[in-house]
Amino acid sequence: MSKEMIVRALMSGLNLTKKDSSNAYDIVMSTIKSTLETSQSIRLHNVGTLHVIQCAEKKYHNPKTGDLETLPPKKRVRFRSSKKLLSIINS
């Protein structure tokens, strides 16, 4: 689902103008981004949880040179779906 589709759904569901719907979408997305930047979790009721995890450094073989190289540790965003969402999807 694209931003445009979400904006249209907001327009029809809440009787907002396209500009207001787009602004609401932008505010929600910027709030999610800023929350994840501070490594806090975001719980979406009946949908799931977005959380930041720290991945350890990894060693891998470079296929071009054959050398053993190291990827530095980094943070990643993970999504864990709620039981209710899983039951809806799997029914």
Image: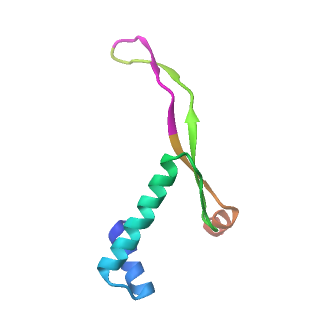
Observer-nearest of 90 and 68: 68
The answer to whether 52 is drawn above or below residue 58 in the figure is below
Q: Which residues are magenta?
A: 65-75
Front-most of 28 and 12? 28
Q: Is residue 33 left or right of residue 80?
A: left
Q: Residue visible at 41% across and 79% down?
A: 9
Q: Quadrant of the C terminus?
A: bottom right
Q: How is the image coloured?
A: rainbow
Residue drawn at (33%, 16%) of the image: 64
* In the image, residue 79 lies in the stretch drawn in magenta: no
The residue lying furthest to the bottom in this view is 15
Left/right placement of residue 27 relative to residue 43 reads left
Decide if residue 83 is on the left or right side of residue 50. right
Res 16 quadrant in image? bottom left
Decide if residue 26 is on the left or right side of residue 56.
left
**Could you tell me residue 2's position as x and y percent?**
36, 66
Residue 73 seen in this snapshot:
yes
Q: Residue at x 51, y 50 (%)?
A: 36
Find out whether residue 71 is within the magenta segment. yes
Position above or below: 26 against 19 = above
Q: Is residue 72 above or below residue 79?
A: above
Residue 82 percent coordinates (x, y): 66, 61
**Residue 40 drawn at (x, y percent):** 58, 50
Report if residue 1 is visible in the image: no
Q: How many marks?
A: 0
The quadrant in which the N terminus is found is bottom left
